[in-house]
């Protein structure tokens, strides 16, 4: 069975390394690219053609919301938004990224004490595996 190919788009080098370690703990997932902002992510998507994209929301040059809009308009791919800005109380942000075409959101833990790394790793792996089974349609830019 082919591995699920994932692109990580995140401006924090620490976070990107943590996500990569979490994802490659699964024998079913491979991280095929990393970008530090949406602009770099867009360049990588067209030639890497990942199965799933995990992106942050707050990044320089092109944020995760605009990145999601561009991906869904030009190269529809299941997107998981991994961000501090999609906590349960961030209804407006969650609504906007879902409207833009993200398939799911996952809040970064607010503190190291909030849940174990293992439970976050399990949740992330499960979400990526589920997203890889989803077909998404293009959403034209307004």
Image (cartoon, rainbow, N blue to C red):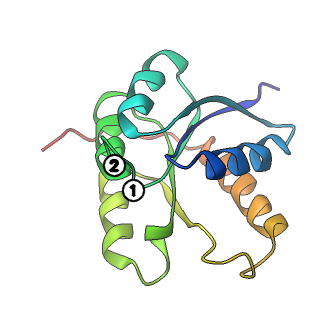
The answer to whether one can see residue 130 in this image is yes
Count of marks overlaid on the render: 2
In the picture, residue 138 is in which quadrant?
Answer: top left
Compared to residue 133, the image places residue 110 above or below, namely below
Looking at the image, which residue is at 44% across and 32% down? Answer: 41
Whole-angstrom CA distance, mark 2 to mark 1, is: 5 Å
- Can residue 137 be seen here? The reply is no
Left-right relation of 20 to 56: right
Q: Is residue 50 left or right of residue 70?
A: right
- Identify the residue at horizontal 60%, vertical 77% (top origin): 110
Q: Is residue 142 left or right of residue 37?
A: left
Measuring from the top left, give residue 104's x and y in whole percent.
Answer: 51, 59
Q: Which residue appears at 38% of the width and 49% of the height? A: 64
Work out whether mark 2 precedes mark 1 in sequence or the reverse, and give the earlier one.
1
Please say if the residues under marks 2 and 1 sit with CB atoms less than 8 Å apart.
Answer: yes
Quarter of the image where the C terminus is located: top left
Residue sitting at 42 percent across and 52 percent down?
102
Residue at image mark 2: 63
Could you tell me residue 105's position as x and y percent? 51, 62
> Percent x, y for residue 45?
46, 25
Q: Give residue 58's mark.
A: 1
């Amino acid at each position: 069975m082919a591995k699920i190919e994932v692109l990580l788009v995140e401006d924090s080098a620490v976070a990107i390394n943590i996500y990569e370690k979490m994802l490659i703990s699964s024998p079913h997932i491979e991280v095929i690219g990393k970008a530090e902002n949406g602009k770099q992510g867009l360049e990588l998507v067209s030639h890497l053609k990942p199965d799933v994209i995990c992106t942050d929301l707050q990044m320089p040059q092109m944020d995760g919301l605009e990145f999601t809009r561009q991906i869904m308009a030009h190269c529809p791919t299941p997107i998981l938004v991994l961000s501090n800005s999609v906590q349960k109380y961030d209804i407006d942000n969650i609504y906007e990224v879902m409207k833009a075409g993200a398939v799911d959101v996952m809040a970064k833990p607010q503190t190291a004490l909030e849940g174990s790394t293992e439970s976050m790793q399990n949740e992330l792996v499960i979400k990526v595996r589920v997203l890889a089974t989803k077909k998404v349609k293009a959403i034209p830019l307004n």
